[in-house]
Amino acid sequence: MADEPNGPPGGDTQLAVRPKAKSKRPPLYKVLLINDDFTPMEFVVMVLERFFSMNHAQAFEIMLTVHKKGLAVVGVFSYEIAETKVNQVMEMARQYQHPLQCTMERE
């Protein structure tokens, strides 16, 4: 077999294979609701149903957790989604003039 013009002598070609870098999963962020003494419980339930796709029973349970413990994790998301949810909750609270606070922190 003749040598190929661009290959190594002898016709043996080997591919240089780089090991695949394992892609890291992006970090996740917890979205938290924080209790206050002024926001109506019904409003918190509505927020949970609307922005966190909870049914009424789930939303009611989380609302009670927020009320009793002072805060609760209402979801875990990628950074962009968590940030959007926090902004949606805060905007709605502003519109209804409630002091409800929603934050996010890295998991």
Image: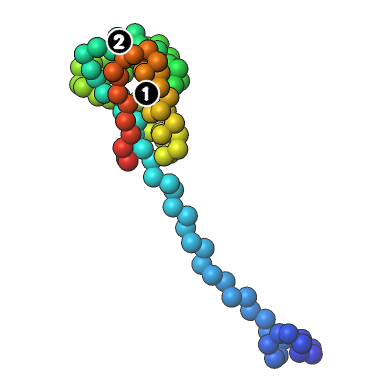
- Nearer to me, 29 or 24: 29
Question: Residue 90's image quarter?
Answer: top left
Q: Of tags 1 and 2, which is closer to the observer?
A: 1
Residue drawn at the location 30% of the way across and 10% of the way down = 41
* Rendered image coloring scheme: rainbow
Residue 60 x/y as whole percent: 33, 12
Q: What residue would you read off at disc 2?
A: 41
The three-letter code of the residue at mark 2 reads: Met
How dense is the environment of label 1, judged by Cα within 10 Å: few (below 14), some, or many (20 and up)?
some
Instruction: Return the mark for residue 90.
Output: 1
Q: Is residue 69 left or right of residue 90?
A: left
Q: Relative to 42, is 2 above or below?
A: below
Question: Residue 54's image quarter?
Answer: top left
Q: Is residue 28 visible?
A: yes
Question: Residue 9's image quarter?
Answer: bottom right
The kind of secondary structure element at disc 2 is helix
The three-letter code of the residue at mark 1 reads: Met
Q: Is residue 59 visible?
A: no
Q: Is residue 25 left or right of residue 65?
A: right
Residue 49 x/y as whole percent: 42, 16
- Nearer to me, 92 or 85: 92
Q: Relative to 78, is 87 above or below?
A: above
